[in-house]
Image (cartoon, rainbow, N blue to C red):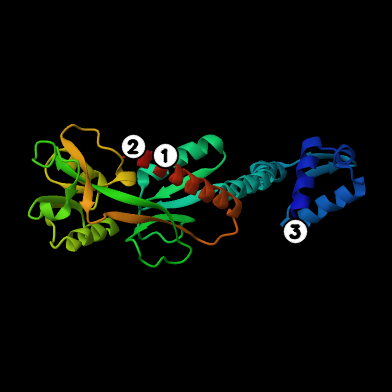
Amino acid sequence: MELLQLRYFLVAAKYQHMTKAAEALQIAQPALSQSIKRLENELGVTLFDREKRNIRLNDTGRFLEKQLIPILASLEELPAALQERASQSVHTIHLNLLAASRLVTDCIIEYKQLHPDVNFRLWQNPDVENEDLCISTAFPGEELKGNGSIILKEAFFMAVPSCSSYAGRPSIRLEELQGEGFISLSNNRPMRRICDRFCLESGFTPHIICESDNPESVRNLIAAGLGIGFWPEYSWGLLSTPKVALLPIEYPVCKRDIILTRRSTEENEKVLEDFCRFLSEYAKREDVKQSSHS
């Protein structure tokens, strides 16, 4: 049973006249008759009641027609659906966002305005391995893995309650905060390890009074003035509450590298290349803007 036979059957069923059906198909009438006869032989049933060139669907033929119409309609739509799916795949960027989330999100919004046909699928999961791009972090000087490149150096502020004695200071040294209660991410997060390292450089281990796997929870607890905490400038943006002040850290230099890692792929190579270039330029522009406000 061939697809062409089934198509011929449906046309014959529509016209119920071999000559008219053959003309519609632009084939010889004997070829159509032979095709229908082979289909009936393969199925082991008759599909038409015949009288010379006049044919009429019997009950079996009507049942087959009813079954075939949606099936062949779906097959006809399949090439267009496959092309659309392939196009979406070529124009979709899978991005794992583990650092600088605010900056990268703003960049995506701007990029989408220029390229509305490009789609993004975002994760914030260090266990994801099949992403096209990953935005992650590393301590300055660490060896980069794979196709990683530094797109930005992100400074950390110290967020302190506005009622504390530190709030009016133009800057602060970490060593002055020994013994203060820190609100922090859990120690399985890269940012936590980097911040702990900053404190160790200043000669102490931070006293953690609250920790969470959820960055939003950490931000909210710090913003509520319940403790102090490191505040990455590009990942978390500016505070929007008078309860907390952000202080530049005078010593040690508290910065981390924001890393863009790209997985090799041929499927959406052109789109990835364009977005990576746009992201790098966007990050440089934001860095200049931030420096001018400092």
User: Where residue 108 sits: x, y (%)?
Assistant: 46, 41
- Specify whether residue 116 is in view: no
Disc 3 versus disc 1: nearer the observer: 1
Q: Give the crowd class for mark 1: few <14, some 14-19, many >=20 residues within 10 Å.
A: few
Ranked by sequence position, the earlier of labels 3 and 1 is 3
Q: Which residue is mark 2?
A: 293
In space, the residues marked 2 and 3 are separated at their CA atoms by 80 Å
Give the mark toward the camera: 1 or 2: 2
In which quadrant of the rendered view does residue 105 lie? Answer: top left
Locate residue 121 relative to residue 193 in the image: left or right.
right
Horizontal arrangement in the rendering, residue 268 relative to residue 68 (left or right): left
The residue carrying pointer 3 sits among few (fewer than 14), some (14 to 19) or many (20 or more) residues within 10 Å by Cα, namely: few
Q: Is residue 12 above or below residue 133?
A: above
Residue position for label 1: 106
| Residue located at (92% from left, 46% from top) | 28
Label 2 with label 3: CB-CB less than 8 Å: no
Instruction: Find residue 61 and report its image quarter.
Output: top right
At a point 81% along the width and 50% down the height, the residue shown is 36
**Is 198 left, or right, of 79 in this rendering?**
left
Distance from disc 1 to disc 2, alpha carbons, whole Å, reads 19 Å
For the point 60% across and 59% down, the residue is 266
Q: Residue 284, how many percent across, how many down?
A: 45, 46
Amino acid bearing label 1: Asp
In the image, residue 107 above or below residue 250 = above
For the C terminus, which image quadrant? top left
> Which secondary structure, mark 2?
helix
Question: Looking at the image, which is closer to me, 56 or 132?
Answer: 132
Disc 3 target residue: 42
